[in-house]
Image: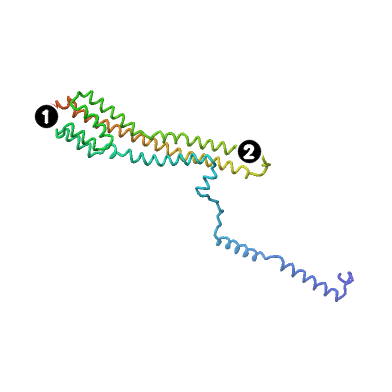
Amino acid sequence: MLGGWGLGGRGRSRFWTRLGQVVLVLLLASPSPVLAEEAAAAQDAQQLDEPAVEPHIPSRNLLQVLRAGGVLMLPLVFCSFLLVVFALERFFALRCARVAPAPFVKRLLHQLAEGQLDRETARKLCSETHCAVADVFAAGLKKWGRPAVEVEQAVLDAGERAVNDLRKHLRIFNGVATLSPLLGLLGTVVGMIRSFNAIAGADAMGRPELLAGGISEALITTAAGLSLAIPALALYLFFISRVDQLTMELDERGRQLVELISAEGLQARPSGRNVKVVRQEAA
């Protein structure tokens, strides 16, 4: 058949040689299934051995966050400063040991009940003790021996002044809790206005980075306002509750004083305990 193609013996030998070379090249070029599987397994093992590279998330410090929030972060920072300062001041001012120290109250009431103190000595002790309950006691001692209604009215008037002093600076917490979300909302509006101005002033199709600055400012001011308003409101409620507890304490101590130094209370004492009172009235 090959002879019909005009190939001689030497031509047929050269043809088979070239054909064998082509087949050998094809066999070497095509990957073996076993070798391919081994290569794939080796690649998978290498990927498992390599540590996973987490995407880098850019972080910013506090100063960068404040700058990104815009100019409305300045009043929020000022409000946070006021919150910290007056929170510390109220924590120290509303301690029970500062408003109604138990040792002083118990000793004074006990000595009055036992008849060991006269009016001037008791008033001197109250003037030397600087606290709210001492002021209430001093106002009541001025009405020593008067009817219970007069002594109680003097104690109530002094108690109201003391409670007003305890409530001092609490409006600051209420103001911070109210203003902070409004400032954050204003920052949100300003940030969105800047975003829309950026869209209007440039070709914003396919360019979301034009919106990033304004939206970031809006979210930062909103988060800052809420982060400041929530603790301010919590502190306001806490201090209001604390003032109510101290008011009840002052009222109870004032009631005990009225029972001891009013005319009705002095007459109800045993005669042995009224010696100093009789001497004082005789003088």
Q: Which residue is mark 1?
A: 279
Residue plotted at (21% across, 24% down):
148
Q: Residue furthest left?
A: 272
Looking at the rendered structure, the secondary structure element under dot 2 is helix
Percent x, y for residue 125?
21, 36
Q: Measure how far apart labels 1 and 2 are at the Cα level.
A: 88 Å
Percent x, y for residue 204?
66, 42
Looking at the rendered structure, the secondary structure element under dot 1 is helix
Left/right placement of residue 189 relative to residue 89 reads right
Left/right placement of residue 127 relative to residue 201 reads left
The mark that comes first in sequence, 1 or 2, is 2
Residue density around tag 1, few if under 14, some if 14–19, many if 20 or more, within 10 Å:
few
Q: Nearer the viewer, residue 132 or 109?
A: 132
Residue density around tag 2, few if under 14, some if 14–19, many if 20 or more, within 10 Å:
some
Left/right placement of residue 17 relative to residue 91 reads right
Residue type at mark 1 is Arg
Quadrant location, the C terminus: top left
Residue plotted at (77% across, 71% down):
21
On residue 246, which mark appears? none
Left/right placement of residue 211 relative to residue 27 reads left
Residue type at mark 2 is Asn
- Quarter of the image holding residue 36? bottom right
Percent x, y for residue 59?
53, 50
Q: Nearer the viewer, residue 51 or 243?
A: 243
Residue plotted at (17% across, 35% down):
111
Q: Which residue is mark 2?
A: 197
- Quarter of the image holding residue 149? top left
